[in-house]
Image (cartoon, rainbow, N blue to C red):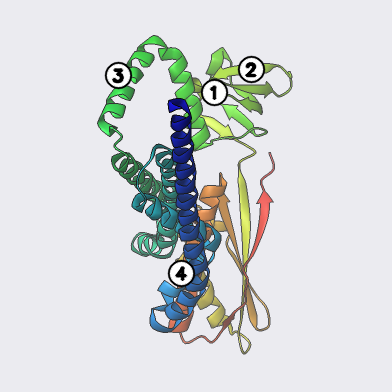
């Protein structure tokens, strides 16, 4: 009789537990659904608010960041609302696991969104101010600031996540430090090669398929020239031109070598066309040519000696040549050229020259032959 009563009580508790779980899941899903629906309505509505009551630059930022990332932002809002509902519900073991997963999702998406917002601010404000104050600044040094901003966002969110979930950050850092010292002493050479591979991956002095030349004396040879076949964690394989043999070079040696990348040498021609209401006189042509040269001579990565200004009956075609070794530097130099283009239009306006700038500017990829 007692066993039967115990079984009935256990069944009742299980039914109540299942009913509580169903109610909890329902509340969480409702909170997520309501917030997602609200986001679908509010995000486009705020676009009109920004366009009417805020500066134009802020409206452009909202369109580039928020509207362009609407789907990701809706997911973030939904997860955030579900997270809040989880914190309001009495805590249980299975809910703690779900809350932990939601927190990871919120941290990752928040980092992505904040990074995109920072990069938009960087491109719109910091880049323009830096170029205006120092046109000769190197592109890589500017982008280092952007990397530091992304790194600061990532570290801040990770620390906040660890603190909010009672994770001992100091203990983890200390453990990693002790373990790292032990590994460094045990496998010093291998670690040097591995770190060299990381440096090559981040710096990207060459890619698979590029033809490169190494400085004299590298690997006991009179100089190495060949095609990169693979870039591993410990070593890089180069197919030597002429002989066809395969040379394996440790990555830490490559980080200290002088590397000449023949395939990476490339340039992009940018063509800008300006139309004038009437025929341009010889004096005006000379003035326009001087304005173009003065506005672009200090741009790092622009081959200003190859800049050409050709005049027609009532137009001028300006050809710029941008030099770059990778997509990152090429992208920055395009942005710097856009700022120089704005400077050209400003100078033409100050000289009371009427003109129309034809859009868009044409970019033509022009690889340099080996």
Residue at numbered disc 2: 247
**Dot 4: what SS?**
helix
Q: Looking at the picture, how far across and down is residue 301, in whole percent?
A: 50, 52
- First-in-chain label (1 vs 3): 3
Q: Is residue 47 above or below residue 191?
A: below
Considering only vertical position in the picture, is 164 above or below 178? below
Q: Position of residue 94 (x, y in %)?
A: 44, 38
Residue identified by numbered label 4: 62
Q: Pick whichever, 349 or 335, lies toward us.
A: 335
* Tag 2 secondary structure: strand
Numbered circle sitting on residue 178: 3
Mark 4 or mark 2, which is nearer to you? 4
Name which of mark 4 and mark 2 comes first in the sequence.
Answer: 4
Q: Nearer the viewer, residue 72 or 39?
A: 39
Mark 3 or mark 4, earlier in chain: 4
Disc 1 element: loop
Of marks 1 and 2, the one in the foreground: 1
Q: Is residue 362 above or below residue 325?
A: below
Q: Position of residue 282 (x, y in %)?
A: 58, 81
Q: Residue at x 63, y 58 (%)?
A: 269
The disc placed on residue 233 is 1
Quick check: 303 left or right of 20? right
**Residue 236 found in image quarter:** top right
Q: Residues within 10 Å of mark 3 (few under 14, many from 20)?
A: few
Q: Tell me whether circle 4 and circle 1 mark residues in contact (CB < 8 Å).
A: no
- 1 and 3 marks in contact (CB < 8 Å): no
Q: Secondary structure at mark 3?
A: helix
Q: Alpha carbon of mark 3 to alpha carbon of mark 4: how far? A: 45 Å
Q: How far across and down, in percent of the image, does residue 67 sit?
A: 52, 67
Find the distance from the CA under tag 3 to the CA under tag 2. 36 Å
What separation in Å lies between label 1 and label 3 (alpha carbons)?
Answer: 23 Å
**Residue farthest to the bottom?**
278
């Amino acid at each position: 009789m007692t066993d039967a009563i115990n079984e009935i009580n256990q069944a009742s508790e299980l039914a109540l537990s299942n009913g509580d779980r169903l109610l909890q899941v329902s509340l969480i899903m409702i909170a997520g659904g309501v917030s997602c629906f609200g986001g679908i309505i509010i995000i486009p509505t705020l676009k009109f608010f920004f366009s009417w009551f805020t500066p134009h630059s802020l409206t452009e930022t909202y369109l580039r960041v928020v509207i362009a990332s609407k789907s990701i932002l809706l997911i973030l809002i939904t997860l955030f609302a579900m997270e809040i509902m989880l914190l309001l519900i009495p805590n249980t073991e299975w809910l703690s696991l779900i809350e932990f997963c939601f927190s990871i999702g919120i941290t990752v998406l928040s980092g992505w969104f904040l990074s995109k917002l920072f990069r938009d601010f960087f491109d719109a404000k910091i880049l323009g101010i830096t170029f205006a104050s120092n046109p000769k600044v190197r592109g890589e040094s500017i982008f280092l600031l952007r990397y530091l901003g992304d790194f600061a966002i990532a570290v801040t969110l990770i620390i906040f996540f660890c603190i909010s979930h009672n994770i001992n950050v100091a203990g983890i850092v200390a453990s990693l430090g002790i373990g790292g010292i032990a590994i460094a002493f045990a496998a010093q050479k291998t670690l040097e090669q591995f770190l060299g591979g990381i440096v090559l991956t981040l710096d990207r002095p060459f890619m698979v398929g590029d033809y490169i030349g190494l400085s004299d004396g590298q690997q006991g040879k009179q100089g190495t020239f060949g095609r990169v076949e693979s870039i591993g964690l410990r070593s890089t394989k180069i197919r030597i031109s002429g002989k066809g043999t395969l040379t394996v070079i440790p990555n830490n040696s490559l980080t200290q070598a002088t590397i000449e990348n023949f395939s990476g040498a490339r340039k992009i021609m940018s063509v800008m066309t300006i139309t004038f209401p009437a025929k341009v006189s010889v004096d005006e042509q000379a003035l326009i040519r001087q304005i173009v040269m003065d506005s672009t001579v200090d741009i790092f990565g622009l081959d200003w000696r190859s800049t050409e200004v050709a005049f027609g009956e009532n137009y001028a075609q300006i050809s710029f040549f941008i030099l770059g070794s990778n997509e990152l530097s090429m992208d920055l130099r395009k942005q710097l050229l856009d700022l120089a283009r704005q400077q050209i239009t400003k100078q033409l306006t100050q000289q009371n020259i009427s003109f129309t700038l034809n859009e868009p500017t044409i970019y033509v990829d022009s690889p340099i032959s080996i």
